[in-house]
Amino acid sequence: MHKPHIPLDELRAQVEQCHRCPLAEGRTQTVFGDGNPSARILIVGEAPGKNEDLKGVPFVGAAGHKLDALLEIAGLAREDVFIANVLKCRPPGNRDPRPEEIEVCTPFLREQTRTIDPEFIVTLGNFATKFILKTDRGITHLRGRLQHAGKFKVFPIYHPAAAIYDHSKQEALEDDFATLGELVRQSDAEKAAAAEAAREEAFACAGQGKPHTGEQEAAGTQPTLLDQQLTLDDEAASAGEQQGLSTDGESTAAQDAANQPSDQGREQA
Ligand code: URA
């Protein structure tokens, strides 16, 4: 049995009331996430910083300005994506998230992902990448290479803040956001081609007086092969058996993907 998706407003209210860890005591407000609730691209950062804690919105500080410019390189705007973080509260002094904080906070991210149901998940930096892909491999190895976790296409990229302190990362960030734009456009083209093939098939069947099946008719909107192979197992996820997004049947696929990154993203770059 698949459990129903929780509406984002309801999840937001749960996050606002959360006291699962001591970060709740130090926050000005929670940072649930922001953007298009039915976005095709979910961007996952690390945790709110000072400005985000004050405004309650992710990526509004210096890293946010960088992110806006990088999204533009991909041909995207904030309205096209949903932006969330691994942690919903600011760690003091912007220290790294702790494992116990990640453990108690990430059920919110998991539910956000199920509700938004994006095609792409862009993970920014090590914390988001390691959580989503359930991998110990670092972002330096994984960045710019398309991965899969369950039915999701996962594209790890350096955290934009990395380029503020290390200018050598700027070029890699720009390259990877350009590749992201290409991946999205390529997926559009594939969907359009599948829909066109289905229309032609239906037309040919009608011309020959043959009935055409529902499958042919709806081919453009049918689950892709990837969806069929790697469907998110809601029950296992809700049972909390997994740390990341992948679930038992899929973790091998996701883990394999993490261990043997596909070079698709790079080849297209
Ligand atoms: N860095 C993050 O990872 N998230 C934010 O929301 C802001 C800065």
Image (cartoon, grey):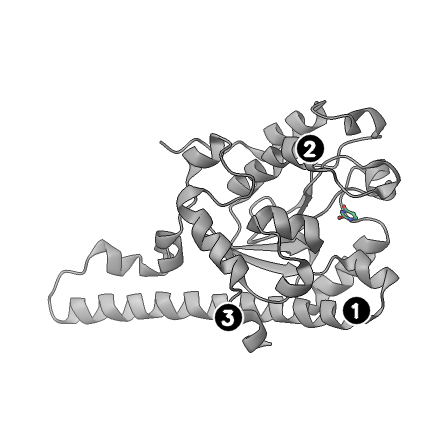
x and y, in percent, of residue 203 in the image? 23, 69
Q: Nearer the viewer, mark 1 or mark 3?
A: 1
Residue 210 picture quarter: bottom left
Left or right: 140, with 93 as reference point: left
Marks counted in the figure total: 3
x and y, in percent, of residue 15 in the image? 68, 29
Q: In the drawing, what numbered circle is on residue 100?
A: 2
Sequence-first disc among 2 and 1: 2
Q: Nearer the viewer, residue 84 or 205?
A: 84
For badge 2, the amino acid type reads Glu
User: Would you name the residue on which mark 1 appears?
Assistant: 170
User: Would you name the residue on which mark 3 appears?
Assistant: 186
Element class at badge 2: helix
Q: Which residue shows up at 11% across the image and 66% down it?
A: 209
Element class at badge 3: helix
**Up-down: is 49 above or below 165?**
above
Callout 2–callout 1 Cβ contact below 8 Å: no
